[in-house]
Image (spheres, helix red, strand yellow):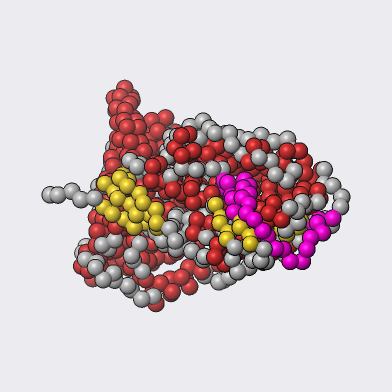
Amino acid sequence: MNYPLIDLVFLVVKGVYILAFFAVNAMFLIWLERKVSAKVQNRLGPMVVGPHGSLQLIADTVKLLLKENIVPSSADRFVWWLAPFFVAVPTIAAFLCVPFSNVWIVRDLNVGVLFICSITSVCVLGVFMAGWGSNNKYSLLGGMRAAAQIISYEVPLLLSVLVIIMEAGTLSMQGIVHAQEAGLFLLKPNVMVAFLVYLISATAEVNRVPFDIPEAESELVSGYHTEYSGMKFAMFFLAEYANLFIISAVAATLFLGGWIGFFRPSAVWFLLKVYGIISFLMWVRWTLPRVRMDQMMAFAWKILTPIALVNILVTGLLLVLKG
Amino acid sequence: MELQELIINMGPQHPSTHGVLYLQLKLNGEVVLDCQPHIGYLHRSIEKIAENRSLTQFIAFTDRLDYMASMNNNLGFCLAAEKLLGITAPPRAQYIRVIVAELNRIASHLLAISTFAQDLGAYATPLFYALRDREKILQIFDQLCGQRLTYNYLRVGGVSGDIPVGVDLLIKDFISYERRMLAEYQDLLTGNIIFCVRSKKIGILPKELAINYGVTGTSLRASGVKWDLRKDEPYLAYDKFDFNIPTGQNGDSFDRYYVRMVEMEESLKIIEQALGALPEGDPVAKVNKVFRPTGETYMRTENPRGELGFYIVGDGNPFPYRLKVRSPSFSNLSVISHLVKGLNISDLVCVLGSLDIVMGEIDR
């Protein structure tokens, strides 16, 4: 049975759904971040546009859309123009393998975890291109920092994901969820360590406090996106929050059992877990100061990576002993 | 490939240069090789303006020097003018002056520590907490003199108005409230491992260097020199109060921060004692309508940022012949190029934040 036309229609519908979710989710997360930060800081946050500022982000988006797109006169125009796409497109592509529920996944690739981890690493190219192309010294420093940081935290991140792959015996996102139906991986101590390593390196991966070194406002003004305005800036911004969603979705799927819950629809459980993790990361962001570049690199290579490596060894031993 | 040094012009518009300060940085990657501060972007020729104003008129201009601690500036200038004219303020005025000066010291230190935390990357949260507390002080000052930033409250010979009914209760409430909050800040910042790792052993200011450069105030005391004019050259009624002078040991950024934290607690102690022993009487001495200063004098007081000195020369006219301000931030900033060599650019921001400069009094 093969109906190419129907397949095409389904593909288009799924693509539209991903894009719509990408935009709406990012807008919701920005609103949530502003509200969480306001709560932490004894403020109200956005309150004017719509009830409790719920329409504020629509107003902001319209403003960014209408804004003039300023190109610095000495910028490398082509690289500068291309950079936001390099950041936003891989992030959208990563939604391909996010299992929202037992049926609600665009394509359950058999290398799903690997796909998400590898395609989101392409973002670093865009970040560095933005830093280089702006021809701004602060941006360049920010881009360099981002490249160093994202590449070094990729290592512990993947090593901690490897533990789950070993436990589940599959790379498919749905397969990993199904493997947890008998019992969550997180209950095992070696997976707990992996979860911790994952959360820390994922925070660094998306440049959030305490690892927001590439965009360190107090040092580098805004880091690699200092020179961007209008919709180009908005693309960086949206991609940042979409990335946040992706890392939390991966965490929820790999460690917290994804859409497994007590009642249907299972997507509710998935979103609950994801937004729970996101809220935790937001709470961290508005509480902690930033670490220094060299301290952060030392932390990645001297502490996180060895822990993750030993953890893999322990996991292997445990699996062998269990038979 | 040839390696080049990167020259970055940090400022005058930059989020963490604390005003319009322009730092010319020579970088090797991210390591600072050289840092040259350039000043003058906020120059308003206040010293020249003083030559065309009577002493009373000039008090309003001292507000604009260190705008984070206007009361202390008022105090420094009024004491200098009183020393030149041979006037002594009545006891009640002296106690009120102590109270407002210490309240303003707390407000200033609150901003100093919270912007320091902001420079270390704690996004706005400590800043908002500190602004909430500072707001209470501003409300007290608002009731005292109707102003929130530039008070113009002190006069030559006293203060412009007595403490209104009820304000002493406000201050008492604030003391107990702020003690609670300071404990919270100790948890939030001093107890935070990232905060400590970022600020300890960064920007160490040796004792000798500090003295040679004329660094004063909390930065000097953090280097281990116990020098506070409130104790060593007591003015007003400071010799009647029981308080300690906190000092640091290492002279690093963390010590400079920590000395400020402890100093706020000491200030609360002083306010409590002054409020308890507030004498009755007039808040202002009987003085002439027009002052005709003759001769010269120099008076220094302990500002939140260090030693604030006013040098006034009078030739018998109502306007002073010459007025010179010795501002603490100017000397404190001059030491920065020694502190940041070989450090990371992130540490430069940390050191600058810990020195707690205000451009208003550097450029004058």
Q: In x, y percent, where is residue A306? A: 31, 30
Is residue A97 visible in the rendered image? The answer is no
Total marks drawn?
A: 0
Q: In x, y percent, where is residue A152? A: 28, 42
**Which residue is drawn at the image coordinates 46% and 39% (left, top)?**
B212
As drawn, A184 above or below A260: above
Image position of A7 (left or right of B70):
left
Span colored in magenta: B282-311
**Which residue is drawn at the image coordinates 29% and 27% (left, top)?**
A313
Image position of A87 (left or right of B199):
left
**Which residue is drawn at the image coordinates 37% and 71% (left, top)?**
A230
- Magenta stretch: residue B140 in it? no
Q: Nearer the viewer, residue A235 or B187?
A: B187
- Magenta stretch: residue B293 in it? yes
As drawn, B24 above or below B252: below
Residue placed furthest toward the left = B1
Image position of B44 (left or right of B163):
left
Q: Nearer the viewer, residue A287 or B240?
A: B240
Q: Nearer the viewer, residue B167 or B188?
A: B167
Q: In x, y percent, where is residue B184? A: 62, 41
Toward which corner of the image does residue A302 lie, by quadrant?
Answer: top left
Residue placed furthest toward the right = B280
Is residue A139 visible in the rendered image? The answer is yes
Q: In x, y percent, where is residue A117? A: 29, 48
Q: Nearer the viewer, residue A257 or B277?
A: B277
As drawn, A130 above or below A157: below
**Which residue is drawn at the image coordinates 62% and 47% (left, top)?**
B300
